[in-house]
Image (cartoon, rainbow, N blue to C red):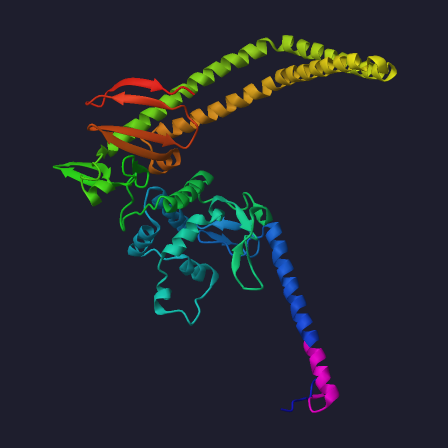
Amino acid sequence: MRVLSVTENIDTSNEDDELMVGFKGIFNDMYCRDISKKIRAGYKQKQKQGIVMIPPMGYFKDKNTGEVVIVEEQAAIVRRIFDLYISGYGIKAIAKILNAEGIKSQGFYQQKLLGKKLGDNKPEIARRFLWENTGVKRLLQNEFYCGTLVCHRFYTSKINHIRKELPKEEQYRHENAVPAIISREKWEQAQFLLRDNVERNVRAGQNSPHHRYTGLIKCGDCGSSFVCRKRVWKDNVRYEYTCNGYHRYGKENCSPHRVDESQLDKLIYDELLEMKEGAEANYKSIEHDVKKWLSQKNTSEKKVKALSDKLKQRKSDQEQILLERIRDREHADIYTGMLTKCEKDIANIKAELAAIQDYDATIRKRKVEMKSSIDILGEIVKEGAISDSNLRLLIDDIVISECGGKLSINIHLKAAFRSHLDIYDENGQLTDKAFAVS
């Protein structure tokens, strides 16, 4: 095939011109690669600077000023999605609720505010702007909603074109880059529940939230999980958890281990109240330690000076002993013993100095940490009940065993607390308490 180009003055039938075509192709390819490299460098620079390109649902960026502001109509939808998920609704259930109420998905608002239209190849159902599971999950995972812009999170491999997430240290984080729609605490609660629900295989109903203890209770006898049963008697409604192994395989293999949801709520709530009281007692003892320390501070400062002088003297003694050992080699063993004792004295003085100097900072730090713990526990129990999200943040698992018609309930919290045993009678009254010896 012969190609003639008037503008390039090329005729491929000419051998010289055919060679020139190859060179021009190389130069054109280099030009394209250079442009691509510059575009990628420009994007990377914007990511480093924390420049928002297209904000997600709930925000609008002014092209003239570059300011990102909250769009309250959309922000209300975002807040509701977070509230529904934290209260126990599943991702699929949330999408169904939004679609049933006629609330449009993010694509609708991008088209409305930015003029971003769907492609002609999209099916008719896509133009209804319905919510689906992936859209709800991505919204819940987006850290932008608590004011943090995270750039350079993913990259696409040039070899197999697979998109992968970059390590945290290679990402560009910009805290407080935009006004927050969701508080940091609520966003972190949602992330915890997203992970925890997958690990525990928690599944909510299609139009209702999952039960409080779903995925948390296990049978100590057969290892099965517990299932919740709704019991209705006249106008009274209660929720009862029983061993799934008993339901599936019969009483020959396991017993029901029935436990009422309200009983578990009371056990855990009472435990948190007791922890709060213990923390308050510890805080008062720290207050006493602080006052005692302040009253003795002048004495301690004098002691620090005396120890510093003593340390200086012992270091000087050490140098003298070393010199004497070099001069008097016949009695080197005696000097070596003296050096060992001197080094031990120096180490003891340093340890005593560090203990006194660090005590002030340590006791104040402990006081702040204890106050924070009391505030957190107070926030959890202030409503007279524990919320579903706080329950899952606190409880690792609950193991229930049955022996002789009596239940043994082991509640494991997600922290290193002291273990204790509470014994209740048939009326649910606490009769005895025993603490484990560590």
Say which quarter of the image contains residue 408: top left
| Quadrant of image for the C terminus | top left
What segment is highlighted magenta in the picture? 9-25
Q: Position of residue 358 (x, y in %)?
A: 61, 19
Whether residue 384 can be seen here = no
The front one of 62 and 186 is 186
- Extreme residue toward the left, this view: 234
Whether residue 232 can be seen here = yes
Please give left or right for residue 273 compared with residue 116 in the image.
left
The front one of 230 and 52 is 230
Residue in view at x 32 percent, y 22 percent = 421
- Extreme residue toward the front, this view: 330
Residue in view at x 65 percent, y 70 percent = 32
Q: Position of residue 322 (x, y in %)?
A: 82, 17
* Vertical placement of residue 315 versus 222, above or below: above
| Quadrant of image for the N terminus | bottom right
The mark total stands at 0
Principal secondary structure, stretch drawn in magenta: helix
* Vertical placement of residue 125 versus 342, above or below: below
Please give left or right for residue 247 compared with residue 393 in the image.
left
Q: Position of residue 92 (x, y in %)?
A: 33, 53
Q: Position of residue 354 (x, y in %)?
A: 64, 18
The front one of 436 and 46 is 436
* Vertical placement of residue 264 versus 158, above or below: above
* Magenta-colored stretch includes residue 235: no
